[in-house]
C-alpha cells in the first residue's frame, strides 16, 4: 500500500470504500445531483435499496450491484465502481439495467408502473479507446435523426483514466470523478474545498480510514483485487508459454506430413494458433479456480465471486464445494 500508517486513507476506487461512502445520504445526494445535472437541493430523497437483483427462474443468473438507490420520483439508479478490466462490460451493464427495469413489476401488473432506470459505471480503465471524453451519457435514440426515443433507460459511463487537466469552473461530475480518482490526503483535502458535498465525502473518507474494522475489510478487498491482477498476469504468461510450446510441436508434426518448407510453415502457424487457444483456456481455468479459492477464504460468497469474474455460477459452486471439502479435512 502506498500510504504510511500515519497517512493512511482509503481510496474510493476500491469498491468497498465506494459502497461505504454511498451509505452517507449527503454524499449520495451530491453525486446523484452532479450526474443528473440538478441542484442537490432538488434531490429530496435517495433511499438505498437491496443490491441483489430479483430472479424469476431457479437457473437465472444472479445480479449483485455495488450501490442501488431509489429517488422520490421512482427513478432507480445502480452504481458500480470497477477497477479490474472486464472484457464484457457492455454486456454486463445491459444485463443489470434490464434486470433493474423489468424487476419493477410483477406478473399481471401494468407496464404503466415502470419508472426510469439509470446505470452508472465508474471505471478505472479505458472503455472507449477511440475518443478522449471521460464522461458519456447514453440514451435510446433514433440512429439517423438523433431524436430521443425514451428517457426510461440511461447509461452513464465515467472513465477515470481520461480525466483532463484541471480547468476553471469544472462541472460537478468532473469534480466528483477527480475526487474518486484521488490518491493522497492532500488531493482529497484540496478537492473538498471546491464543493460542500465533496467536503462531506472527504469527512466520511477520514472517518472510514480511522475505523480499524473498516480498514481491515478494505485491505482484504484491496488485497483480493491485487491478487486477482497478479494471477491473471501469471496465467496469461503461462498460457502463452504452454500454447506456444504445444503449437510449435503440433505445427511441426503437421508440417512434416505436408512436406518440406511450405507445409511446415502452414502447420506451425495453425498449430501455434490452436496451441495458444488451448493454453489460454487451461490458464484461465486454473486461474479461475485459484482466485475463487482466495476469495472464498476472504469470506466472499459463490454468487459474488461468479458475478465479479463473469463466470458460470455452477462452475463456481463446484469449486466452492471442493474448497469446503479440502478445508474440512
Image (spheres, rainbow, N blue to C red):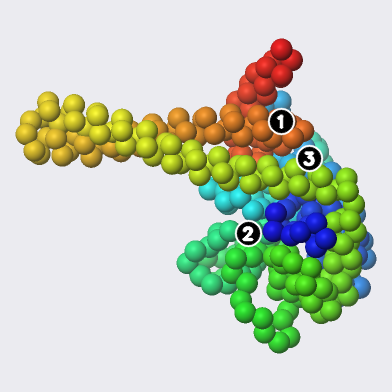
The alpha-carbon separation of the residues under discs 3 and 2 comes to 23 Å
Instruction: Name the foreground residue: 109 vs 267.
Output: 267
User: Helix, strand, or loop for circle 3?
Assistant: strand
Question: Is residue 152 among what the camera can see?
Answer: no
Residue underneath mark 3: 52
Depth check, front residue: 276 or 171:
276
- Which residue: 57% across, 33% down? 288
- Quarter of the image for residue 263 reads top left
Please give left or right for residue 57 compared with residue 86 in the image: right
Determine contact: label 1, label 3, CB under 8 Å.
no
Q: Residue at x 19, y 31 (%)?
A: 252
* Quarter in which the C terminus is drawn: top right
On-image quarter of the N terminus: bottom right
Where's residue 229, x and y in %?
A: 58, 46
State the CA–CA distance, disc 2 to disc 1. 25 Å
Please tell me the numbered disc located at residue 124: 2
Picture layout, residue 39 above or below residue 50: below
Q: Extreme bottom residue here?
A: 168
**Residue under the image location 75 percent in, 72 percent down:** 187
Earlier residue among tags 3 and 2: 3
Query: Viewer-nearest of labels 1 and 3?
Result: 1
Tag on residue 296? 1
Residue 323 left/right relative to 144: right
Amino acid at each position: 500500500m502506498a500510504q504510511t500508517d500515519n497517512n493512511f486513507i482509503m481510496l474510493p476506487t476500491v469498491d468497498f470504500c465506494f459502497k461505504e461512502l454511498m451509505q452517507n445520504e449527503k454524499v449520495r445526494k451530491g453525486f446523484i445531483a452532479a450526474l443528473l445535472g440538478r441542484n442537490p437541493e432538488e434531490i429530496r430523497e435517495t433511499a438505498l435499496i437491496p443490491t441483489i437483483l430479483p430472479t424469476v427462474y431457479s437457473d437465472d443468473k444472479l445480479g449483485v450491484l455495488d450501490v442501488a438507490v431509489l429517488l422520490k420520483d421512482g427513478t432507480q439508479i445502480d452504481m458500480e465502481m470497477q477497477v479490474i478490466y472486464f472484457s464484457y462490460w457492455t454486456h454486463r451493464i445491459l444485463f443489470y439495467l434490464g434486470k433493474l427495469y423489468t424487476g419493477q413489476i410483477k406478473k399481471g401488473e401494468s407496464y404503466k408502473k415502470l419508472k426510469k432506470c439509470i446505470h452508472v459505471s465508474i471505471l478505472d480503465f479505458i472503455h472507449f479507446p477511440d475518443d478522449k471524453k471521460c464522461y458519456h451519457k447514453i440514451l435510446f435514440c433514433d440512429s439517423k435523426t438523433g431524436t430521443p426515443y425514451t428517457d426510461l433507460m440511461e447509461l452513464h459511463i465515467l472513465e477515470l483514466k481520461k480525466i483532463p487537466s484541471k480547468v476553471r469552473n469544472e462541472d460537478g461530475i468532473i469534480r466528483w470523478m477527480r475526487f474518486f480518482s484521488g490518491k493522497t490526503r492532500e488531493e482529497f483535502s484540496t478537492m473538498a474545498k471546491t464543493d460542500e458535498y465533496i467536503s462531506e465525502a472527504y469527512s466520511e473518507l477520514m472517518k472510514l480510514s480511522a475505523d480499524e474494522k473498516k480498514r481491515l475489510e478494505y485491505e482484504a478487498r484491496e488485497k483480493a483485487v491485487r491478487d486477482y491482477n497478479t494471477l491473471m498476469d501469471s496465467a496469461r504468461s503461462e498460457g502463452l508459454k504452454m500454447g506456444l510450446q504445444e503449437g510449435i510441436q503440433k505445427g511441426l508434426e503437421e508440417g512434416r506430413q505436408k512436406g518440406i518448407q511450405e507445409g511446415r510453415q502452414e502447420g506451425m502457424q495453425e498449430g501455434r494458433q490452436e496451441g495458444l487457444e488451448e493454453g489460454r483456456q487451461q490458464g484461465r481455468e486454473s486461474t479461475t479456480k485459484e482466485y475463487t479459492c482466495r476469495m472464498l477464504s476472504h469470506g466472499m460468497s459463490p454468487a459474488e465471486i461468479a458475478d465479479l469474474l463473469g463466470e458460470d455460477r455452477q462452475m463456481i459452486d463446484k469449486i466452492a464445494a471442493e474448497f469446503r471439502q479440502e478445508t474440512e479435512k
